[in-house]
Image (cartoon, rainbow, N blue to C red):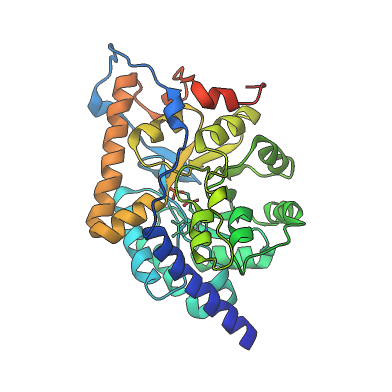
Amino acid sequence: MEDLKSKSQIRSARKKEHIHHFLHSNFEGDNYFKYIYLEHNSLPEIDFNDIDTKISFLGKKISFPIMINAMTGGFDRAVEINSSLARVAKKLNIPMAVGSQAIAVNDREYESSFRVVREILKDGVVISNINAFAGVDDVQRAIDMIEADGVQIHLNPAQEIVMPEGDRNFKGLLKNIENIVRKIDKPVIIKEIGFGISKDVAKRLLEVGVKYIDIGGSGGTNFIKIESARNEKFDFSELFEWGIPTALSLLECRSLSSDLNIICSGGIRRAEEVVKALCAGADMTGISGPILRELLNGGIEGAEKYLQNIIYKSKVIMLLLGKKNIQELKTVPYKVKGELKELLSDSI
Ligand code: FNR
């Protein structure tokens, strides 16, 4: 019991430090979306006011295919942060994923910062989050805690291995994921946290029954940088460029199967990147760090304005492509150029 308590306290302190180091560094990387080219349409033949951005996600209608992706929970300020994020998600009718619930699954004292998200979002889309070592019972507890519409299982070997107190043994994770997917009756989303999912990994996930992935590519928030700043023994700056850029991860995973539900996240900051992701085969997009930064610097209004801006400008780009709904974006004949083209595997 004492051991569990101190483990929770370490986890809680770490959550706070992540936000501190996130805010005190520059995490603007290259997501490779600049290598995707969309052609302008001078004869769009649509009325801007008819553009419909609604989609169905995890069984519910949402207003735009963007979600506030997993960040936090489980320390003193997290109640305030998560309730603010939930208010923004509620206002815009978009989904929100909570940060890892491992801390609260082990110690109920930490549940409130997660529960508050469901309380505020009411019947909106709320997604659980836990690590890939978690047993089925813990995954179910995380879902029940917030009556989640789905659960993200995060893959974060790059973070763990750089984290002084992180995990070192990654054996057996695929088998565990297979077990979770078999036994959990809600959608299970396998999610990277900023280093991208390769085609090979996506294939192995598909083979064990995974239907949803969040590619979480590189180009945005970088947990090697965050953990390196917390690591007093090693400086990992030589790995700051590590990872599969988001646009590359997206194209590679999409080329595998048209049935796989793909959430595209990692370094998405602007409307053009959201639209490019949707054209290149994403079913949904996710943003974390930039929203948190807006929230902590400009309050709820700042975060809401940031997302409203993205949504409005995405509609502007849809008009310039002549596409009146999200489904039609999938028919845009985008082109791939430069380094992104060079890195694509031959089969695409
Ligand atoms: C994260 N992220 C994250 N992901 C996850 O699956 N579980 C978690 O608990 C957290 N915690 C977390 C804390 C903070 C402060 C940040 C900024 C991010 C990762 C996040 O969901 C996302 O995958 C990456 O941040 C990449 O997206 P952005 O930030 O570039 O949009």
Residue 244: x %, y % from top left: 57, 39
Q: How many marks?
A: 0
Residue 24: x %, y % from top left: 37, 60
Extreme top residue here? 43
At x 35%, y 63%, the residue is 120
- The answer to whether one can see residue 317 in this image is yes
Residue 236: x %, y % from top left: 56, 55
Q: Quadrant of residue 76?
A: bottom left
Asked whether, in this view, residue 209 is left or right of residue 128, the answer is right
Q: Pick the residue in front: 132 or 119.
A: 132
Indicate the quadrant containing the C terminus: top left, top right, bottom left or bottom right: top right
Q: Pick the residue in front: 218 or 60.
A: 218
At x 56%, y 30%, the residue is 251
Q: Say above or below: 207 vs 174.
A: above
Asked whether, in this view, residue 208 is left or right of residue 348, the answer is right
- The answer to whether one can see residue 149 in this image is no
Q: Quadrant of residue 271?
A: top left
Q: Pick the residue in front: 192 or 226.
A: 226
Asked whether, in this view, residue 298 is left or right of residue 124, the answer is left
Q: Say above or below: 218 vs 164.
A: above
Q: Say above or below: 270 vs 147.
A: above
Q: Say above or below: 301 vs 141.
A: above
Asked whether, in this view, residue 305 is left or right of residue 126, the answer is left
At x 62%, y 27%, the residue is 255
